[in-house]
Amino acid sequence: MVEPKGDAWTAYLAAARQLDAVRRDAATAAGEQHRSVQAAREELTGVRARLTAQHERLVDSGVPVMSLSPSPPEESVAARSMSGGPSAVLAALRTAGGWVTEADTALTSTGLFRPERWPARLRNLAVYGPLALLVPLIQVVLHLVAGGGPVSVAALLVGLPMPAVAFVAGWIGVGRLFRPGPDGRLDRTPRFGALICLVPAVSTAAGLLLALLAG
């Protein structure tokens, strides 16, 4: 039996509409996939840059490089989490971005209490400074208690070589308290340390000498 032309045309139109719907759905899916791929690439670039900066900070702080590399089981878990296509990859990268933000917060909050992360001069000042002030402070106290005389003169004479002693003690202390950098060297800032040890001693000696002469 031959199907009437009207019924054939109706069937054709229905099939054409179905094909158009499939085409539209495919185009929509392709567009979403393209946007997911583009967003994943941008997210990957940002996460990679932040991870590189954190890696350098941790290595500078003495963390072994091997401990910063993912283990095979961790890589396997990460691969499975991204097996669902670009959308799954984007979701995983955004999750990783959140972890990187939390790590940045942790590193920033603890950095203030980690002197090895300070600039070399500021870090070494915490060692040279107290040693440089110790003897001048004792000299001033003795002068105030004794009120001048032989005790102050003796304190003044004994304090003359103390800057060198403070510098040597600071040099050793910096080596004991802080670790070398990635290049294997430790910046002890010798000129800065010598200046820190010398200025309080010279100032105190000049003040005591003027006080003795005035008395």
Image: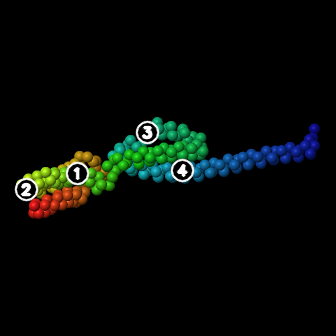
Q: Residue at x 72, y 46 (%)?
A: 25
Q: Is residue 133 left or right of residue 8?
A: left
Q: Is residue 31 left or right of residue 157?
A: right
Q: Is residue 187 left or right of residue 79?
A: left
Q: Which badge, 2 or 1, comes first in the chain's sequence?
A: 1
- Judged from the image, the secondary structure of the residue bearing numbered disc 2 is loop
Q: Position of residue 150 (x, y in %)?
A: 6, 55
Residue under numbered circle 2: 149
Q: Residue at x 57, y 46 (%)?
A: 90
Residue under numbered circle 4: 43
Mark 2, Cα crowd under 10 Å, few <14 / some 14-19 / many 20+, is few
Say whether residue 112 is visible.
yes
Single out the mark in the foreground, 4 or 2. Answer: 2
Tell me the distance, in whole angstroms, between the alpha carbons under discs 3 and 2.
72 Å
Q: Is residue 46 left or right of residue 65?
A: right
Q: Which badge, 4 or 2, comes first in the chain's sequence?
A: 4
- Judged from the image, the secondary structure of the residue bearing numbered disc 3 is loop
Does 38 appear above or below 83? below
Residue type at mark 3 is: Ser
Viewer-closest of 48 and 143: 143
Residue type at mark 1 is: Pro
Q: Residue at x 59, y 50 (%)?
A: 37
Residue under numbered circle 1: 130
Q: Position of residue 28 (x, y in %)?
A: 69, 49
Q: Residue at x 33, y 52 (%)?
A: 118
Tell me the distance, in whole angstroms, between the alpha carbons under discs 4 and 2.
75 Å
Instruction: Indicate the quadrant containing the C terminus: top left, top right, bottom left or bottom right.
Output: bottom left
